Amino acid sequence: MFTPETLQKFDREIAKYPAEHQCSAVMACLALAQEEIGWLPPEAIEAVAHYLAMPPIAAYEVATFYSMYDLKPVGKYKLTVCTNLPCALSGGVHAATYLKEKLGIGFNETTPDGKFTLVEGECMGSCGYAPVMLVNNRRMCGHMTPTAIDALLEECQS
């Protein structure tokens, strides 16, 4: 199901653990699978589980627990806005509302062109930079005022 390059990356992650604990690489391997496919369909989660010689339900438990794993297709840019209390008090709700209006979608929706998916997120541990957003689960953006959001969206459009 995965390219040889992705399987090599799986093997690098597995090598970080003792042989009897190779299933400890499940989070990294799920992330790599998602990177290749764009999201985690059930077949991909099961394939990762089989590769790690672990029960598929154990891989599903990880994939369904963490918000960084996408269990349905998402846009090219997944924008996760923190609306937990510190961010909410510092403009997180306003940032989310601005994005909803700007993109014309709500949380857990994708723009018709498939470019953006908007997600409500939990604490990202950067309260001092509130409001905070994550782009594609990897890039943290802080102080997301309307001006900063416009700049980010423009960057993604180009």
Image (cartoon, rainbow, N blue to C red):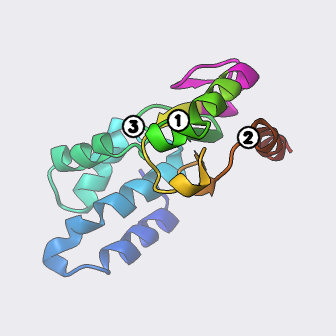
Residue in front for this viewpoint, 34 or 1: 34
Quick check: 92 above or below 134? above
State which quadrant residue 11 falls in: bottom left
The residue located at (18%, 79%) in the rendering is 19
- Does residue 152 appear anywhere in the picture? yes
Residue 50 is left or right of residue 116, and the answer is left
Q: Amino acid at mark 3?
A: Pro
Residue 14, image x, y percentages: 31, 74
Residue 104, image x, y percentages: 70, 18
User: The C terminus appears in which quarter of the rendering?
Assistant: top right
Residue 125 is left or right of residue 100, and the answer is left
From the image, tell me which residue sits under label 3.
Answer: 41
Q: Amino acid at mark 1?
A: Ala
Disc marking residue 70: none
Disc marking residue 145: 2
Report, in whole angstroms, how far the alpha carbon at label 1 lies from the one at label 2. 13 Å
- Few, some or many residues within 10 Å of mark 3 (<14, 14–19, 20+): some
Quick check: 50 above or below 122? below
Disc marking residue 88: 1
